[in-house]
Amino acid sequence: MNEATPFKDDRKLAYLNAEGADRPLKSPLPAEVLDRARAYRLSRFRALMDAHNVAGLLLYDPVNIRYAFDSSNMGVWTSHNPIRYALILNGGPGIMFEFKGCEHLNDGLPGIDELRNSIGWMFMCAGDRSGERLALWADEIVTELRAHGGGNMRLAVDRLEPEGVAALSARGVEIIEGGQVTEIARSVKSADEVALMRWTIRVCEAGMARIYQHSVPGVTERELWAHLHFENARSGGEWLETKLLTCGPNTNPWYRECSNRECRLGEMISFDTDMIGPYGYCADLSRSWICGDVPMTDRQKRLYAAARAQIDHNLALLEPGLSFAEFNAKSWRIPAAYQPHRYSLAAHGVGMADEWPVVLLHPDFEASHSGHFETGQVVCVESLIAEEGSESVKLETQVLITETGAERLDSFPWEM
């Protein structure tokens, strides 16, 4: 691996361990912060269930299960293997269905009223007995709805294979799209959630400092990306949702993932962290800077200045009660030369992952959904600036909507 060299901007390196030692970061937050956040999150789900008149909420998405119960078990693997799930009954218990051998992972979680073994009916584990296991699964869910629903058989579901929908429907269950419960519930954070998220951002910024420290000629994109993985993993984080770090010509068009390409002196390095960190919260930050200790070219400066202008302008608009349509009407107008390579959105919600709302960029806003910003929401303000034949500058900041406006939660220095 390439050796790090001193850089002109020591402000970035200050985000490494404050003790000056290359050690994991340890959260200073007391246990009661997490306990209060757990109680708040489950109460949000229950309140939205009541508002939508559903008898139960069935969760397969590991992010939603983490939000509800703080229960986590191989989050990436279980995101594509539907073998563990949670059922929250409206006015009744919260039941965690864990796969056999992993029951101990739920010890001490206060939101779980009952722990049961899950029934895995996907073909990988059930094979030619899938139908048999599916029937057992559906009967168990329906039994709980009848016991606690008072005749209400409306079940909100975040995700479910077609066979599961058919089996429940055949037993008289009305399936309700669960996103209207989970996404709206998750969108407003408590003060304790924000405290947990600030710590994830602190860890992310230490990882960004490591990337900066090693942004020297000859380093590969994958080597740089590994520094964020390393800092996140050793400091208690979870995973990275993407691999969006590229340099030079690989930055345009955007969305190439990191490769073995070596970065060259003076090239732009651009990245988007998409980091699921400590406590399961997301730090979704983007930065762009130059490889090696050399100044930007005039073209790089122009692109970077436009990206900063978009971030600063749109950030200044944010306040509670502002509708997405009003935000769009007042938002920074991307010049025509940059539009062919534009990013698709101007802002989006973030919590334990990217989440509702998604506010599209002004050329695409007609396809955006309705709504307004609320106190307690955390949103990411985005910019991607590039023109034909140029590199891309990618910037993104994570902000809390307060009663008076917006407060940035990240503070990693910009360039220029």
Image: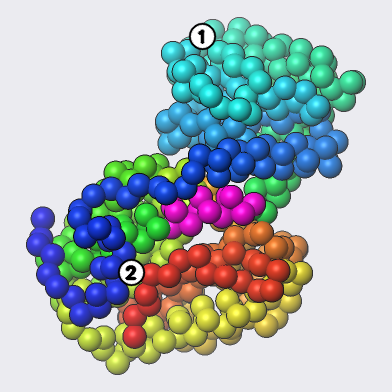
Residue 320 screen position, x and y as percent = 72, 69
Three-letter code for the amino acid on which mark 2 is drawn: Ser
Residue at the image position 43 percent from the left and 36 percent from the top: 76
**Which secondary structure lies at badge 1?**
helix
In the image, farthest residue toward the bottom: 298
Tell me if 226 is positioned left or right of 232 in this view: left
Considering only order in the chain, which callout, 2 or 1, is on the residue closer to the N terminus? 1
Asked if residue 17 is positioned above or below residue 335 in the image, the reply reads above
Residue 265 screen position, x and y as percent = 15, 76
Task: State the CA–CA distance, disc 1 to disc 2.
Answer: 48 Å
Instruction: Give the quadrant of the N terminus.
Output: bottom left
Residue 160 visible somewhere in the drawing: no
Instruction: Give the quadrant of the C terminus.
Output: bottom left
Magenta range is 190-201
Residue at the image position 55 percent from the left and 34 percent from the top: 70
Residue at the image position 44 percent from the left and 13 percent from the top: 101
Marks 1 and 2: which is nearer the front?
2
Residue 170, quarter of the rendered image: top right
Residue placed under numbered mark 1 in the picture = 128
| Observer-nearest of 212 and 400 | 400
Crowding at label 2, few (<14), some or many (≥20) Cα neighbours within 10 Å? many
Which secondary structure type mostly characterizes the magenta part of the structure?
Answer: helix
Task: Name the mark on residue 270.
Answer: 2
Asked if residue 56 is positioned above or below residue 254 in the image, the reply reads above
